[in-house]
Amino acid sequence: MPKLHLEWGANAPTENFDTTIIVDCLCFSTTATIAVSKGIEIIPVSNRSIAQQLALKTGLKLAGKRSQGGLSLSPKSFALCQELQPVILASPNGAKLSTITREGRVLLGCYRNAPSFAKLNLGPLERVLIIAAGEQWSDGSFRPAFEDYFTAGAIIKAIGGQLSPEARGALAIYNAACSAAPELMLASISGQELSKNGYQNDVIMAAKYGANTTIPQLFLKGATEHPPSDLSSNQQFSGTMYYAKIAPASQLTS
């Protein structure tokens, strides 16, 4: 059976895992999953400064801030989008994690696609790392996020296997709280922040268990294989490393 382990944030291991699943429930993973399920490629970058430079360099569409309207980190903005052109999406959490070169394949997980991980093709001894992205305090320091830990637990339950103590802890949280997922996400610090700023519907969308079946996979743009290990040092803009793309079901699920 596969071996599952959970870690937090940008300092999580990048090697010795066959599959890494990045979980940023509110909102990067959710927004990217909705976008990719519609056929929209997402190019992740870690901050808006890099995103703006990359947009100028490539001419690609740049997602803005929620307050500006149009495409943004808001899941609703992509749910309503009719255009299928690639979009640069900045986020200091999930998108930042998506620009870090990792050994093995890299997938995005959220509460909306968590049940689909039950059909993920995994080898009997495959090593799987689930990264709970977490958030940031106002001073920029790392803040663990309930919604990411909870969602990681939902994905761990769907996959099953041999669990590390950290993975077992996330699973226990999920099992204890899954019946009240929407209420708890809204009541979490992240949920309260979004609701206070008028984006309560983003939290409600993120809490819809099983609403999407797509599992986005991160690829080197224009390539079909995993990126070389020295990719980071060879790219001027880290955001050009990967884009989220729907992999054929035969490659991801059974």
Image (cartoon, rainbow, N blue to C red):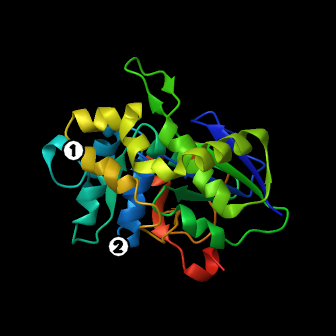
Residue 66 visible in image: yes
Above-or-below relation of 40 to 235:
below
Quadrant holding the N terminus: bottom right
Between 133 and 164, the one lying in front of the other is 164
Q: Disc 2 on helix, strand or loop?
A: loop
Most extreme residue toward the top, as rendered?
A: 139
Q: State how many labels appear.
A: 2
Q: Earlier in the sequence, mark 2 or mark 1?
A: 2
Image location (x, y in percent) of residue 107: 57, 59
Quadrant holding the C terminus: bottom right
Q: Disc 1 on helix, strand or loop?
A: helix
Above-or-below relation of 219 to 197:
below
Image location (x, y in percent) of residue 99: 51, 47
Q: Quadrant of residue 225?
A: bottom right
Whether residue 91 sits left or right of residue 144 in the image: it is left
User: Looking at numbered disc 2 in the image, what kind of residue is underneath it?
Assistant: Lys
Image location (x, y in percent) of residue 139: 40, 17
Identity of the residue drawn at 24% across and 43% down: 199
User: Looking at numbered disc 1 in the image, what kind of residue is underneath it?
Assistant: Arg
Identity of the residue drawn at 47% across and 45% down: 94
Whether residue 223 sits left or right of residue 139 in the image: it is right
Residue 41 visible in image: no
Image location (x, y in percent) of residue 44: 42, 51
Q: Quadrant of residue 11?
A: top right
Whether residue 234 sits left or right of residue 27 in the image: it is right
Q: What residue did someone put label 1 on?
A: 66
Asked whether the beta carbons under mark 2 and mark 1 sit within 8 Å of each other, the answer is: no
Q: Quadrant of residue 118?
A: bottom right
Whether residue 239 sits left or right of residue 122 in the image: it is left
Mark carried by residue 38:
2
The residue carrying pointer 1 sits among few (fewer than 14), some (14 to 19) or many (20 or more) residues within 10 Å by Cα, namely some
Identity of the residue drawn at 51% across and 37% down: 146
